[in-house]
Amino acid sequence: MTKRTTTAVVIGLGLVTLSACGSSDSAGAGDSKTVTLVSHDSWAVSKSVLEDFEKQSGYKVRVLKDGDAGQAVNKAILTKDNPQGDVFFGVDNTLLSRALDNGLFQSYEAKGSDQIVQQYRIDQDRHRVTPIDSGDICVNYDKAYFSKHKLAPPASFDDLIKPAYKNLLVTENAATSSPGLGFLLGTAARYGDDGWPDYWKKLKANGVKVVDGWEQAYNDEFSGSAGGKKAKADRPLVVSYASSPPAEVIYANPKPKTAPTGVASGTCFRQVEYAGLLSNAKNTKGGKALLDFLIGVKFQDDMPLNMFVYPVRETAQVPEEFVKFGPQAKDPETLAPAKIADNRDQWVKSWTSLVLK
């Protein structure tokens, strides 16, 4: 499993100067038969599905993975006048306003947009971005630990600050990690502008452990993951994704009949990822075809088991493992992109001072 991370230079300190510049041959001429997709490192698609698009469209797809989500967005903004590609995938609702405010995308209404779940459709007057996938950042728990200790796993944010769960939770740094930031935003949505700092004071007093990123938290610190078992991890609660339990089943050999981990459904924050046609893209025609593909049935059906996210197309097929072991939260916390934009940097600075110092 690979997870999107967001760097501190993007979240906490705003945009910084990067030396990289857009490649002059990244997309070729305007009538080029190569179309370039710029993305974070977690981009994945089945070879046969991508080859089918290339055969049908006549375009060869070049994928440029540009680091974690925050780094990729940052670089795309800084190189927007001479972009590295034609389409950008992977800006989520936590950073979307920054991309839009900086003019990263040009308007294009992708074919099939009318099939996207209504709640994910935004920017409907300008169509600068197209929703591609969604996922829930949630606390996961180690079923074996709670069974052994005859303790009910936590179900909500409120539960996590109770004495019964002292020293059990590990989370990611909100300034360096996408799930860490999502968890912070979830608490801000749940407790409000004035209430979330007090909640984190109580969480800190209850022994929450903070590490830099998802890989360390999930695979080194969390006792319920395959990696955590090998590392003899001792934290039975971790901030991860609702799709993590299905992954524990899918990648296990032999596959268990049930997932060894569960999700505290009252701790979830909904993350939505978007793609858009880059401003000044050299191959706009190819870029539009690629966006149509990303929202098309074949890619949407293929995506869950490659990137462990949920499709946003209403008719897309969700894998059985997702339905059985990692259903989406029925009532996740959400925040409007504008609300996140107005408060994100200050919230992260306040969180850092409160939790890490």
Image (cartoon, rainbow, N blue to C red):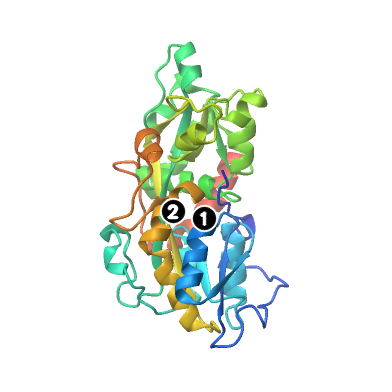
- State the image coordinates of residue 173 (x, y, percent, origin top left): 59, 44
- What residue is at 42 percent from the left and 68 percent from the top? 293
Say what secondary structure mark 1 lies in: loop
- What residue is at 50 percent from the left and 75 percent from the top? 104
Q: Quadrant of the C terminus?
A: top right
Three-letter code for the amino acid on which mark 2 is drawn: Asp
- What residue is at 55 percent from the left and 24 percent from the top? 167
Q: Can I make out residue 266 in this image? A: yes
- State the image coordinates of residue 202 (x, y, percent, origin top left): 48, 31
Q: Which mark is residue 46?
A: 1
Q: Can I make out residue 181 in this image? A: no
Q: Earlier in the sequence, mark 2 or mark 1?
A: 1
Q: Quadrant of residue 116?
A: bottom left
Say what secondary structure mark 2 lies in: helix
Q: Residue 94 or 297: which is nearer the viewer?
A: 297
Q: Is residue 258 above or below residue 201?
A: above
Three-letter code for the amino acid on which mark 1 is drawn: Ser
Q: Quadrant of the N terminus?
A: top right
- What residue is at 49 percent from the left and 82 percent from the top? 284
Q: Is residue 53 above or below residue 175?
A: below
- State the image coordinates of residue 197 (x, y, percent, origin top left): 46, 42
Looking at the image, residue 214 sits to the left or right of residue 164; the answer is right
Q: How many marks?
A: 2
Q: Are marks 2 and 1 in contact (CB under 8 Å)?
A: yes
Kindly report the distance in space between the C-alpha atoms of the residues bearing marks 2 and 1. Answer: 7 Å
Q: Which mark is residue 302?
A: 2
Q: Residue 261 or 198: which is nearer the viewer?
A: 261
